[in-house]
Structure formats: structure tokens, C-alpha cells
Amino acid sequence: MVQNYEVVIVGAGPAGLSAGIFVARQKVSCLVISKDLGGQLNLIPKLENYPGTLMSSGPLLAKTLESQYLSFGGELTYDTVERIEEDSEGLRIKASRSEYSAKAIVLAPGKVPNNLGVENETSFANKGVHYCTKCDAPFYQGRVTAAVGVGGYLLESGILLSRMASKVYLIYKGGALGGDKDLIASIEKKENVQLVPQSSVKSLSGTGTLQSITILDNSGKEQTVQVDGLFIEMGSKINLDFVKHLVKINTKGEIEVTEGGKTSHPAIFAAGDATSIPYKQIVAACGDGASAGLSAFNYVEKLKGRPGIRSDWKKTIGDSVFHY
């Protein structure tokens, strides 16, 4: 049986949950569908750069957002969206366990970092192994680090780490760094950066936390170096196969969005890391999620012949309604 909602949100990361909060507050039926709670928030053991939040973590923020969303009457189900299609009633969402219909959809599936693919990698996640240099480099002030990756991802990681760590091993498979020439020139001048070309990370070692990595070069020679942290910057993957026939996707595989999270489809909105927004940060995802949620709500309201809203917060005092 198809379950009907006015707005369906795909993804329960910061963008999806923020969209849900701003939709559910308007007292329309809203469902969030996600494989998990939090998405990449679960990769953040310490959260330092979310305004107004101290001594928090990614998982704690995810639970807080979930509680807010559910308190406004929104619904959440854990499932995998397999296909979205148009029908006479609006949009049909086929998930692995059920089907749903909606007047509007907010896409916030996020992205998943590519793993290095070595044994016991997951056991060191957030215990010395990290997938977001921008997020976690500040924890390695004055410590020994390594970064392995490709292209611009690796260059940016190397620059950030060089400003904080006492030493940085920059590991890459090619004979030369690839990407922006100015960034490459800057890295080559850094005295605390050691370039390790034509090499890959073979294994990770440590008791409880990461303590060393073994590097294998193209000739078969191995060397083990002591490090406090390893940053894996192999890019990320975004799964949009379920909706790419309905919205415009750019050359990076991201959903093209304009103001208010609008996509090329009038009833589909998007926010977060899976979109073309330039800043992949939690606070940006939350803000864009709120905008996309309000845009979806306004779309549904206009279908009903109503004007929609520009502000979510209001207070009634006597006969006056104040928006702020």
C-alpha cells in the first residue's frame, strides 16, 4: 500500500533533518527516509565548528536534530530509496520496503567518503584515521600526520595539515602531485611536509589508536613510519541513480541547485553535500536544508492556492502576528 505525505525528505543528515524541522513545524505531513541517522555526522567524534555548540559530537548533534524533528510531528523511517518517478498525483518514491507518494521532495542524501581499502581501516576510524581534513586537522596541532589521496583533495589536505602538524607525510601513487600549480608550489616549499611519491599505504597499526602506517612504493620497498593521524582524501561518492532522470546533475555528480534549494524539477528541492553548494560544512547543510524545506512547503501551499511563507518564526500578540 502506498503511504501518502505532502513532503518526503531523502536523507537524515544535518541537511535532511533541518529540512524536516522546518517542514514539520508547518503542520503538514512529512516523512524522512534514510539508511541511517546522521550520515557523515557519525564520522565526527568532536564537533568544534558548529556555532553555539561546545563539547559536542556529530552523533549527539544528529540525535538532537532528530528529537527536534520528531517533536514537531514529523515521521522517520529507515529504508533505501530505489527510484523516484512522476505520477498523476505528484511524485512516487519506491523504497526497498515500501512505496510513498508526495507533492514535494527534498533530496539530502549526502555523500560517502571513499575508503582506502586496507585491512582494519574501519577499526581506526576516528581513532587516528580521518576522512575530512577540514574537520579534524585542528586536533593534530604539533603532532605527526600523514595524508594519502588524489588531486586537489590531497593538496588541500597537505596545506591544512602543514599549518598545524609538526610533520606531514604526503603519500600519492603518481610520480608528481596533480592539481593546482600554485598549491603544489606552496606545498613543495613547506619544510614540515615530506613528499612520498609512487607509493601507497599498505597497512595500519596501533593499540587502540593509530600509531604507525606501512608505506609500499612501486618497487616493492616498504617503510613503516610513526604517525598520530592519517587523513584519507580519496574523494567521495554520491548516489543519485534513483533520481538523476528527474533533476539536473553537474559534471561533479552533484545536484544543481539555485536559491532556496530549487532544482530543475519544480517539485524537487535539494540541500547538503550532494548539491552544488561550494561549502561542505555542517552549518551550511543545516541552513540550506531549512531553506529547501521551506521551499518545499511553499510549493505544496501554492498547489492549494495559498501564498506560502517567507518566515518560519512568528508570534501572535493580541490581534497582531509578528514574523521574525
Image: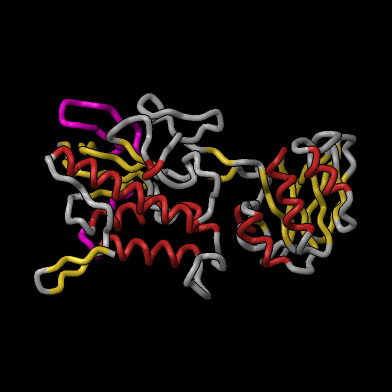
In the rendered image, the quadrant that contains the C terminus is bottom left
Left or right of residue 278, residue 32 in this image: left
**39 w.r.t. 276: above or below:** below
Left or right of residue 68, residue 111 in this image: right
Q: Please indicate, yes or no, whether residue 293 appears anywhere in the rendered image.
A: yes
Q: In the rendered image, which quarter is residue 150 located in?
A: top right
| Magenta span | 71-97
Between 224 and 73, the one nearer to me in the picture: 73
Counting the numbered discs, the total is: 0
**93 w.r.t. 125: above or below:** above
Residue 192 in the magenta stretch? The answer is no
Across and down, in percent, residue 116 comes to 67, 44
Residue sitting at x 38%, y 42%: 261
Residue sitting at x 38%, y 29%: 247
Across and down, in percent, residue 63 comes to 38, 64
Across and down, in percent, residue 278 comes to 55, 44
Between 71 and 270, the one nearer to me in the picture: 270
Residue sitting at x 35%, y 53%: 290
Residue lying at the far front of the rendered structure? 320
Q: Main secondary structure of the magenta part?
A: strand
**206 w.r.t. 302: above or below:** below
Residue 86 in the magenta stretch? The answer is yes
Between 324 and 207, the one nearer to me in the picture: 324
Left or right of residue 298, residue 213 in this image: right
Across and down, in percent, residue 47 comes to 54, 66
Q: Please indicate, yes or no, whether residue 46 appears anywhere in the rendered image.
A: no
Q: In the rendered image, which quarter is residue 300 located in?
A: top left
Between 3 and 49, the one nearer to me in the picture: 49
Residue sitting at x 42%, y 28%: 248
Residue lying at the far left of the rendered structure? 319
Q: In the rendered image, which quarter is residue 144 located in?
A: bottom right
In the rendered image, the quadrant that contains the N terminus is top left
